[in-house]
Amino acid sequence: MKTHPVTLPEMAIVAITRGMAGAGAGLLLAERVPREVRRAVGWTLLAVGAATTIPIVLSFLGKRDASG
């Protein structure tokens, strides 16, 4: 069985990056914010959320421990 030890700060980082990506996607789909503002902020949040996910996943994969 494979285990993935994750600390509370790591979980917070994952939650924040997922939230940023979700907020960016939500802004891209929203219609109440002016189009130019929505696109700029939405794409920025989505890109930062997605880009920060890659090092987090690589960090988790590097910490894997196979036991059992």
Image (cartoon, rainbow, N blue to C red):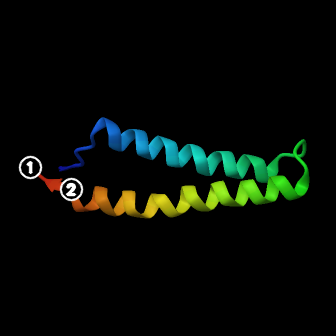
Above or below for 12 versus 68: above
Q: Residue at x 28, y 60 (%)?
A: 61
What amino acid is at disc 2? Arg
48 on left or right of 1: right
Q: Nearer the viewer, residue 37 or 11?
A: 37
Above or below for 30 versus 52: above
The residue beneath circle 2 is 64
Q: Residue at x 43, y 64 (%)?
A: 54
The residue beneath circle 1 is 68
In the rendered image, residue 53, in percent from the top left (x then y), is placed at 46, 58
Q: Nearer the viewer, residue 68 or 46?
A: 46
Above or below for 8 versus 43: above
In the rendered image, residue 22, in percent from the top left (x then y), is placed at 63, 47
What amino acid is at disc 1? Gly
> What element does badge 2 sit on?
loop
Q: Residue at x 27, y 43 (%)?
A: 6
In the rendered image, residue 62, in percent from the top left (x then y), is placed at 23, 62
